């Protein structure tokens, strides 16, 4: 009954919620650009103010300084909040971010990116609409709706909203580790709404992310760039060595050529295979998203497995070689090849790096080159995997069924959301990824949008999830 | 007797000549930079003025316009000149260029690049000192010295001085072809002093240049750059295809893998092999110039053969991939690999391109990729070869013996000086490359210099060459 009343109220109030989304999309909180830093801070302060108005207590954490465009400036605040402290209720920690990617009308936006604009299909265009202002606001709307109705929230909430997610979450990990046994004391579960459905119509719960290990192969020889007329044919050219080594990393079909790299990969169980059935995903959609029929695998199952549960290796580019349009007859003296491996359970970053280094060195040795080679790992982030059978996920699944009348897709992501693992490690609690937006929302792209349906039903979903969570045994 | 008097006079007047070199080094005639275009024109006008003062008639040719930094501007003039029209004398056409490479003190120059500065070893540092203002001025000093001594020049001279050599000689070919049967009518031989000795102490005559054919391999697939987290392992990545194809072009030892590419290469004769003996060149010097011991071949003979008379293939870089410092997890949607082949007698550019295209397409086909490939030739320039037995070269060799008391090295160059072939083709006359500078002059580099000895003995050499040329049967 309570939840139904809440649903009805959300439907009724939806224009208000959209209006408030319009209000915050208008704050251009671009975290990577010095000129917008004041707006990022303004957005953080908007949240503090709204949380306080709702009756939450807040804590503004200043995570320190950063150097941006040559200037040392304050990082935007991490906004912590507490709504409810009833010891008889579970406590859920909610994470979101209030900063956004840059957006310029000239980049090809059909509408002003800072003016939420809804079309006749209910698509609400605006920077940050889906990533991640819509979901962040969604949590606030859930509280507002309950207050409007005189209903108590079934759980206590803690908030952690950051303003640097689009710029590497600088400063956040320290805050989380510092507050794990302080402000976040007593948290029972974590929920993050900052990814996307697999398709356009069916909600999902996300229980896995790949890790990423980023490598650099540096090959150097000549003391300076050489003229290919004078030296071509007489020196060991670093570029020749590098493309030979890079060609020995992965096949055109995506098979990683590093010996032993698959040894740690978790075997595929029948149970896991079954979860790949009936997902809202088609090869047509996949090719539409990729922009061409450049798919390696013919079916959905293989494609998603290679996105989610198998490692992949991508070559990103070469630093130090000629990269401009036109023709330049240079022999580059030092070239740096960049590639990364998306890692999966149960690979360990240290072992992956060990195998990569061994392989790269062995392949380079075969070339008998007089140049020198160095291979190093620029950064690595571990994969994350949870269980869709964990009560936190079951609560999420029940909420989906309640709002949408269907079971959610159980998905993983090929990319990384590093904060997920940070929360899990620091708090030792289960983390649920419960997305609001659809696969075609275009976060980071021009014409980013959030469908009105996803926003409204998403608010219902977040609310319903709180009720399901309160009822389940964790 | 005449020549000896000329030599003595040059020795006596050398400080004057250096002072005049100082005067023109101070004109920053950088052809690739809009800000210096007025100085390029000023330098051209300086030459016209000096030629007229010496008694030459001149013709200022305006070769048209170019687009530079978004602006359409006039190309600098091609300065033509005639000194002497005696039908009983031979007529020599002399080519040189009066523009220079850019130079900034901040780049690491020890002295002001626009202020000719001589050190205790007689090294005269300054941009353009050796490339090509020293040699151009050298010709004028030869005339001046003869005038001072009341001596007649033994040949008629025609001049062709351009101001765009460092920027692809834009407009020059048309001028040469237009004037071949007009202003250049009656020319018997051509001399260019715009390259360098093989070593530091021994002069040379240069009788060959490699050609160059520049290629672009374009591989495209996805509709836009993709995120490697989302798409890694599921799409045919253009970078993977490209490094695989590029790795099949040339071995780390420089062996070109294009089938048939060596078929047209002229066989090495015993006579030719003999010319590689006794050259002023050592592997130590080679490694010093390359900046490391990255040499493929162990001896001078093999090294110089691979620079001069065998083709080479260099990989220059990749356009469209990630090339900046740092880490970016992009799958580039379209990448363009650049490479060039230095071509040699008797390769034909059309056949080389045909073989390259066939090979690249065949290698790409092996990958079974769903991406698309295109391979095209951006530009090609033919090799040039002359005979050191031609009377024009014999005259040059005799002049070297007269000034330096030793036979010149007979050299070729691995790079191109395209105007050489243009003159030969347009005028159907022999072209002699008669360098003034030493191997370590550092044209195009910081701290470019011309040794006083090379300048002074070089003026003598150019003058002696005119006398030898007048005496020989062409």
Image (cartoon, coloured by chain):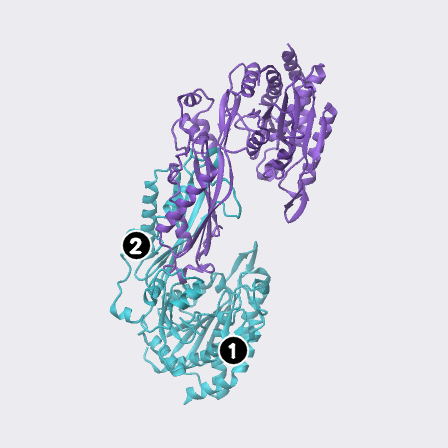
Chain colours: A cyan, B purple
Specify the quadrant that holds the C terminus of chain B.
top right
Residue at 63 percent of width and 42 percent of height: B33
Viewer-nearest residue: B371 or B119: B371
Of callouts 2 and 1, the N-terminal one: 1
Report the residue that reaches farthest toward the top. Answer: B1
| Left or right: where B419 falls relative to A260 | right
Q: Is residue B405 left or right of residue A251?
A: right
- The secondary structure type at the circle numbered 2 is loop
Residue B196, how many percent across, how many down? 54, 27
Real-space Cα separation, disc 2 to disc 1, in angstroms: 46 Å
Q: Is residue A274 above or below residue B232?
A: below
CB within 8 Å, label 2 to label 1: no
The chain to which mark 1 is attached is: A
Residue A13: give x, y in percent of width and height: 52, 84
Q: Is residue A266 visible?
A: yes
How busy is the neighbourhood of tag 2: few (under 14 within 10 Å), some, or many (20 plus)? some
Residue A61: x, y in percent? 50, 67
Q: Which mark is residue A460?
A: none
Q: Can you give x and y, in whole percent of width and height, for residue A426 in the image?
A: 38, 66
Q: Which residue is disc 2 drawn over?
A: A261
Q: Please, is residue B151 above or below residue B83 in the view?
A: above
Q: Residues within 10 Å of mark 1 (few under 14, many from 20)?
A: some
Q: Nearer the viewer, mark 2 or mark 1?
A: 1
Residue under label 1, please give it. Answer: A122
């Amino acid at each position: 009954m309570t939840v139904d009343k809440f649903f009805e109220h959300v439907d009724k109030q939806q224009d208000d919620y959209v209006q408030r989304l319009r209000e915050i999309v208008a704050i251009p909180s671009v975290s990577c650009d010095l000129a917008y830093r004041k707006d990022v801070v303004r957005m953080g302060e908007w949240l503090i103010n709204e949380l306080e108005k709702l009756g939450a207590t807040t804590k503004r954490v200043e995570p320190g300084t950063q150097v941006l465009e040559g200037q040392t400036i304050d990082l935007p605040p991490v906004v912590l909040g507490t709504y409810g402290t009833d010891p008889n209720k579970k406590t859920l920690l909610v994470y979101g971010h209030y900063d956004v990617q840059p957006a310029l009308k000239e980049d090809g936006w059909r509408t002003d990116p800072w003016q939420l604009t809804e079309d006749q299909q209910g698509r609400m265009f605006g920077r940050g609409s889906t990533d991640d202002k819509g979901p962040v606001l969604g949590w606030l709307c859930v509280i507002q709706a309950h207050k409007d109705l005189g209903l108590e929230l079934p759980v206590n909430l803690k908030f952690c909203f950051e303003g640097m997610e689009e710029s590497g979450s600088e400063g956040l990990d320290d805050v989380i580790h510092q507050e794990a046994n302080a402000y976040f004391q007593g948290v029972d579960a974590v929920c993050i709404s900052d990814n996307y459905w697999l398709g356009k119509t069916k909600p999902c719960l996300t229980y896995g992310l790949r890790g990423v290990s980023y490598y650099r192969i540096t090959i150097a020889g000549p003391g300076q760039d050489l003229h290919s007329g004078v030296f071509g044919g007489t020196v060991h050219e670093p570029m020749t060595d590098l493309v030979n080594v890079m060609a020995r990393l992965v096949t055109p079909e995506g098979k990683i050529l590093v010996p032993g790299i698959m040894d740690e990969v978790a075997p595929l169980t029948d149970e896991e295979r079954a979860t790949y059935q009936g997902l809202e995903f088609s090869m047509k959609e996949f090719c539409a998203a990729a922009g061409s029929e450049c798919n390696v695998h013919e079916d959905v199952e293989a494609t998603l497995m290679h996105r989610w549960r198998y490692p992949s290796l991508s070559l990103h580019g070469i630093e130090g070689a000629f990269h401009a349009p036109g023709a330049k007859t240079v022999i580059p003296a030092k070239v740096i090849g960049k590639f990364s491996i998306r890692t999966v359970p149960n690979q360990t970053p240290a072992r992956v790096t060990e195998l990569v280094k061994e392989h790269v060195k062995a392949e380079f040795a075969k070339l008998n080159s007089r140049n020198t080679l160095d291979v190093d790992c620029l950064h690595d982030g571990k994969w994350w995997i949870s269980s869709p059978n964990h009560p936190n996920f079951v609560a999420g699944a029940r909420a989906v069924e309640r709002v949408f009348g269907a079971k959610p897709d159980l998905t993983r992501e090929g990319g990384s959301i590093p904060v997920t693992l940070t929360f899990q490690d620091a708090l030792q609690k289960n983390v649920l990824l419960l997305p609001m937006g659809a696969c075609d929302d275009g976060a980071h792209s021009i014409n980013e949008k959030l469908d009105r349906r996803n926003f409204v039903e998403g608010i219902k979903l977040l609310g319903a999830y709180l009720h399901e969570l309160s009822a389940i045994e964790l």
